[in-house]
Image (spheres, rainbow, N blue to C red):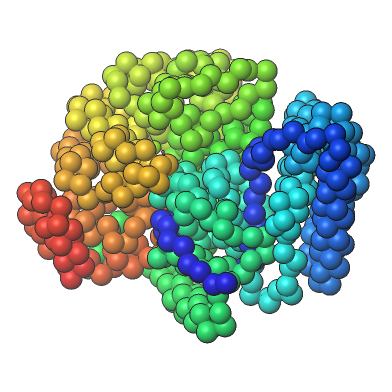
Amino acid sequence: MTFALHGLAVSQGIAIGHAHLVSHATLEVSHYVVLPRHVPEEIARFDAALAVVRAELIALRQVAEAGAPSEVSAFVQLHSMILDDPLLCQVPRELIATRRCNAEWALVQQMDLLVEQFEKIEDAYLRERKADVVQVVERVVKALLGRPGKLPTKRRSDEQMIVVAHDLSPADTINFKQNLIGGFVTDLGGATSHTAIVARSLGIPAVVGLHHARQLIRDEDLIIIDGSRGVLIVDPDERVLEEYRLRKTQLELERSKLKRLTTARANTLDGHPISLQANIELPQDLTQVKAVEADGIGLFRTEFLFLNRNDLPSEEEQFESYRTVAAALKGKPVTIRTLDVGADKALQRAGQVERVEPNPALGLRAIRFCLAEPPMFLAQLRAILRASAFGKVRILVPMLAHAHEIDQTLQLIRVARDQLRAEKVKFDEEVEVGGMIEIPAAAMALGVFLRRLDFLSIGTNDLIQYTLAIDRTDEAVAHLYDPLHPAVLRLIADTIQAGARADIPVSVCGELAGDPAMTRLLLGMGLRQFSMHPAQILEVKQEVLRSDVSLLRAKVGRLLRHDEPDRVRELVGKLSDS
Ligand code: PEP
Ligand code: MG
């Protein structure tokens, strides 16, 4: 049956493909007591479910062997082995008999035990196999509940895998960089959550905040994601499918036309040169950065090197990553942001009891975390400084609010420099240090920052979150996350103007910088440096090339005097003819 779901559009484009449901960490099944006389029936129910899944896997293997990538067939084989392991197919039978519990419950109990054992395994590859155990168990539970997995239909070559999940962390999403995923949809999430940001950097369509997608969609359902409109269509009929295939081709055509702008200089109509830099998460994003000939890296979110692992990356490992990026940019600026963990990007560290934070977004995040862990911070600062010998590296410090945080950071940078000098390790003595303006307090006390730092970068994602008290990851309040709120515009404009007066460069590296609908507004505020996911650079460049800053300055000046949201929105819309 065809149906559509509406959510938040977070990453543009159209994907057509088959659903791949990502498992919940724990399966929610009911628990009930089985009367002794019903135990044999319950065991037979369990056996029947195993048989259903066995047949599903055999059928899957046949499909896989007929042309799917070899990893698919390997993974189906692994799942068949897991299913036939006595720990999964025998022990639950015994549990049903001895504990007189229902089959789902027995199976999930056993799964929890196995998962716990997997988590203790040293070898990272083997440890990760716990996800396969969970997926197999989920298949059996579905069969027990009378909802067996659908078998895959033969795929057309333009159809891809669409990940459907209740929620995805930024750490999950970054793993997609290694896999060919057509797009993803989630029940939870906000448009500027890090999960959404990673989706944009991957250039894959995504829709979040769909509420019940994970429950309504079944494995292998045919799905269309319209990432620009935030729409998901399940089981589309042939007419809709054709329409979307056509739109997909048109979008690809438009994108390829934009490629002509790659080598064009980003000058406005009245001749102002605009710097369009890239945000990256990992060195492997360099391919995209080079493809669009970005003017540099305006934001390297180094925390992604720290996610999906139980240990911290060593100074050496970090140095290698930073050096790779610095060298690849051949003298163009590379702005390396120090670790911004916390909130939705929590570190997992072996042997440490996770502290349940009352409010992670307001907690020990970013620079607060780094200053609380000096040896770790020092290792990162040393790695960044060492990389500065290989390119034009700049250090960017996130989430600053207090003068003493800047002073402490600068002191640690001095320590790192002194150490490297003493060790005769080369680094650039002129490395600039900048700060993110992403807490309203910082935007309202700019003097503190302008006097101490070499440059500023406005993080609009957090600036909006903290100004409006809207959790950027929470779809329940996503409608209140408003970049055009007069208070937000005031803080951004004031920061850009104060920077210009003090002759301290200011850039914007939040998602606003990559939104072509906002380019003219930011230009009119006086912004000359933008940093965004590389996939957006050419579209923003197109706007820059069509803009006249002298006209925009006057119009935006007038716009900023308004505080009625509808009027502000209307005036922003009208900027498109300047
Ligand atoms: C921001 O807050 O706008 C920003 C660029 O940083 P992040 O999205 O990584 O918090
Ligand atoms: Mg931020």
- Seen from the viewer's position, the closer of residues 211 and 69 is 211
* Quadrant, the C terminus: bottom left
Please, which residue is most extreme toward the front here?
37
In the rendered structure, the answer to whether residue 487 lies left or right of residue 458 reads: left
Quadrant position of residue 462: top left
Q: Is residue 283 visible?
A: no
- Seen from the viewer's position, the closer of residues 522 and 396 is 522
In the rendered structure, the answer to whether residue 346 lies left or right of residue 443 reads: right
Q: Is residue 235 above or below residue 163?
A: below
In the rendered structure, the answer to whether residue 268 lies left or right of residue 8 reads: left
* Quadrant, the N terminus: bottom right
Residue 13 in the image, given as x and y percentages of width and height: 48, 67
Residue 199 in the image, given as x and y percentages of width and height: 51, 53
- Seen from the viewer's position, the closer of residues 458 and 291 is 458
Q: Is residue 394 above or below residue 219?
A: above
Q: Residue at x 39, y 20 (%)?
A: 410
Q: Residue at x 54, y 45 (%)?
A: 167
Residue 364 in the image, given as x and y percentages of width and height: 44, 22
Q: Residue at x 82, y 52 (%)?
A: 49
